[in-house]
């Protein structure tokens, strides 16, 4: 059964977010949290990463940084998510073999195959536009049908795990059925009125309903 991969919002400060994260994580089988941080001085960023890591890693969940490769080891994160082939290639020497190097921003099948050949630990299809807040499937993000097709293609032919990004709760089950190893949920889950834990519990039910 696929596991969940969570985006955080783009955070200016992590203090207010950590309690929300603590409430949400027990609600489902979460494999990884992608921490997205606004710019600050290096010491501040390291402290913020460590604060989130304390909540995430004690549950045996991987904490990944959105870029910021130079801070991964110093802050004790488990790896980084890199957007585009150039960023992935540049980061690999610093991350491998001890830490996770994930690949996103893959605009074509050729990009996906290059990432797989470069030994990315996972490939993500359909993530939100990295330039903005990222909720939903706006900006340069591909339509859901294209994401679903790309996940199915990759899952059928290649070994490295793939992640399908769900911009809505309704996209979770189809991505799992297409063969995604993980389903990513974006920052939209943190603004839901019932709390992220409600969304995660429903996501877990959707994943469990997909035939094995």
Image (spheres, helix red, strand yellow):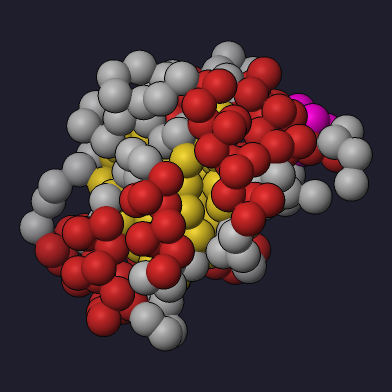
Left or right, 1 with respect to 74, comes to right
Residue 197 appears in view: no
Left or right, 40 with respect to 98, comes to left
- The residue located at (22%, 59%) in the rendering is 87
Q: As displayed, is residue 75 above or below residue 104?
A: below
Residue 180 appears in view: yes
Query: How many badges with numbers are in the image?
Result: 0
| Percent x, y of residue 65 | 34, 57
| Percent x, y of residue 114 | 36, 60
- The residue located at (47%, 54%) in the rendering is 123
- The residue located at (64%, 24%) in the rendering is 171
Q: Which residue occupies the foreground of this view, 3 or 113?
A: 113
- The residue located at (63%, 55%) in the rendering is 157
Q: Main secondary structure of the magenta part?
A: helix
Q: As displayed, is residue 203 above or below residue 61?
A: above
Left or right, 87 with respect to 25, comes to left
- What segment carries the magenta color? 201-206
Q: Quadrant of residue 93?
A: bottom left
Furthest-bottom residue in this view: 97
């Amino acid at each position: 059964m696929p596991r969940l991969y969570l985006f955080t919002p783009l955070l200016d400060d992590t203090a207010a977010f950590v309690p929300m994260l603590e409430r949400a994580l027990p609600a489902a089988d979460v494999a990884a949290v992608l921490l997205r941080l606004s710019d600050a001085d290096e010491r501040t960023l390291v402290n913020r990463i460590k604060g989130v890591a304390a909540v995430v890693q004690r549950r045996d969940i991987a904490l990944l940084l959105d870029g910021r490769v130079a801070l991964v080891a110093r802050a004790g994160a488990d790896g980084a998510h890199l957007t585009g082939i150039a960023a992935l290639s540049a980061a690999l020497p610093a991350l491998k073999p001890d830490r996770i190097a994930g690949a996103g921003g893959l605009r074509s099948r050729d990009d996906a195959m290059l990432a797989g050949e470069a030994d990315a630990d996972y490939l993500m299809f359909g993530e939100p536009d990295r330039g903005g807040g990222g909720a939903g499937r706006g900006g340069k993000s591909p339509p859901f049908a294209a994401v679903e097709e790309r996940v199915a293609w990759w899952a059928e032919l290649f070994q490295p795990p793939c992640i399908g990004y769900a911009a809505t709760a309704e996209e979770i089950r189809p991505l799992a059925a297409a063969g995604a190893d993980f389903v990513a949920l974006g920052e939209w889950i943190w603004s839901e009125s019932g709390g992220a834990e409600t969304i995660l519990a429903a996501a877990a039910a959707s994943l469990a309903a997909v035939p094995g």
